[in-house]
Amino acid sequence: MAEPMGFFTDTTVCIGCKACEVACKEWNQLPARDGGAPMLSGNSYDNTLRLDGTHWRHVKFIEQFTPDRRDGRWLLMSDVCKHCVRAGCLEVCPTGAIIRTEFDTVVIQSDVCNGCRDCIAACPFGVIEMSPVSGTAQKCTLCYDRLRGGLEPACAKACPTDSIQFGTIADLRQKARARMGQLHASGEKRAYLYGADDTMLGGLNAFFLLVDQPEVYGLPRDPKLPSRNLVPSSLFSMLGAVVVALLGVFSFRDRGDRR
Amino acid sequence: MGLPDTFFTAAPNWRWLIIGYFFVGGIAGGSYLLAVLIDLFGDTDDRPLAGTGYRIAFAAVALSGVLLTADLGRPERFWHMLLQSKTAWPMLKPWSPMSLGAWGLLFFGGVTFLSLLAVLAEAGRLPWRRLVRLRPPGALGTLVALVGALLGLFIAGYTGILLSVTNRPIWADTWLLGLAFLISAASISAALLILVAQSHGRSRRAARALGRFDRWVLVLELVVLVALVASLGAVARVWLSVWGGALLGVVLVGIIAPLALLRRDLGAAAPVAAILVLVGGFLLRVVLVLSSEHVGRV
């Protein structure tokens, strides 16, 4: 197996140019939404709105301004599949379409997926959606085809500020910690890393440097695996099955009108 | 701020076909269980009612397969849940409720088919009389019945576990969905068989047993629904909406009213009570599925 590869997305240097979105769409031949009909969301400069089956990179625009707009800041974040080391989507996929690759990334094989959509409900980040083209669930592949060819993913290649960096997880974590130290030293004490260690789902292979609470970026504070509910839910159901069966035996056997 | 982690996820767009499956699958599992109970503890008068129960179970499990396949983005690939599409080896992940459920449905379908054969043979509709042995009494028939009853209980309950083994609001915020679906499957199946028995005008003893059973199960269902709301904690706020009203409707129309109408000797109001239980059981699934589906991403 090759070394684990991933993204480090430093949101503090993102300028919201959306080159990553465009590069992703071009390389992966993802179609325009609604046949390219113009759509303005009214939500800042963000007309993509969410990751879905045909948008595998999405630049979030978060405006934080005082009511009189004298003071404020932009938070910009290029969102993407986190390629979790312990991935909820992979865990539930009933067809085996979702696999872990030799690069430690998570990929949906579109020739295997049958569109049951369990992975969509399982992903703690809301990354996966159906593609209207293939009728299957789709998301970022971390450009598996480019990686196989020794190239870096299209979004990282296109990013003009190196907000999106591609590399081995070990290298990226080192760079991320150095960057956080630099920001702390220059007074930006709010900077922290999201998913850069093994505590969050065994580590996010696409992790982020953020300067506000995770929820502000639309990220869960403590993402969890779907399987956490499997055993307790099953135990309660089994208890219910025993009670229903006993009630059945009791009701059908104790036929007061028989004797 | 302070939003539960399940609110940062995307809805899988499981809607009417899936709601329909949760209802029909519940009928399939519950009807089979009740047919087995009638077969094991009833007398000859009750045998036609049990036979109808097996027929309902088979029809319902067949319809379940159709509904689930139709809901897929690529229906022609439904078999990918059972065989690995590239190697044709069996595809099974026991820790994924959907994977286990696909196999459960296959085996349950097989067992309900055996029971259907026995019912048809007994009715003289098949040339092979010996197929009657696939139904109790008798060792083979009892074995088929018990395996089918266990699979039926599984089919009735795993769907709720499937919803909980995700990261969606409400579904993943409680451990009681499987239990609630299972209990509800028992109550709607008993209601359906009460309707059948009343229209036959036969099997009166089994019908009274069904009434007794349904009253117990409806009380249990009420307790489980209260516990379900409590188990959601702060997430239950989602139900401070039209969904909460609908859930209240489930309790009043589908539980309280039938409990008031179902007398010890069933009585004239029994069909009305049974229909209310069925309506309530369907509405329960609508609420539990759609109230989560309607929570959008932040």
Image: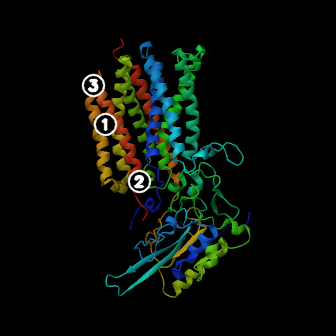
Q: Which of A181 and B286 is in front in this view?
A: B286
| Residue that mark 1 sits on | B255
Judging from the image, what secondary structure is the residue with disc 3 in? loop
Judging from the image, what secondary structure is the residue with disc 1 in? helix
Q: Residue A110 carries which label?
A: none
The residue under label 1 is which amino acid type? Ile
Judging from the image, what secondary structure is the residue with disc 2 in? helix
| Residue that mark 3 sits on | B263
Q: What is the x, y in percent for residue B126?
A: 57, 17
Could you classify mark 3 by the number of other residues whose Cα lies within 10 Å: few (under 14), some (14-19), or many (20 or more)? Answer: some
Q: Quadrant of the N terminus of chain A?
A: bottom right
- Give the Cα distance between marks 2 and 1: 23 Å
Q: Is residue A136 visible?
A: yes
Q: What is the x, y in percent for residue A169?
A: 65, 71
The residue under label 3 is which amino acid type? Arg
Subunit under mark 1: B
- Give the Cα distance between marks 3 and 2: 36 Å
Q: Earlier in the sequence, mark 3 or mark 2?
A: 3
Subunit under mark 3: B
> Which residue occupies 56% across, 61% down?
A201
- Give the Cα distance between marks 3 and 1: 14 Å
Name above or below for residue A238 compared with residue A50.
Answer: above
| Residue that mark 2 sits on | B292
Closer to us: mark 3 or mark 2?
2
Residue A71: which quarter of the image? bottom left
Q: Earlier in the sequence, mark 3 or mark 1?
A: 1
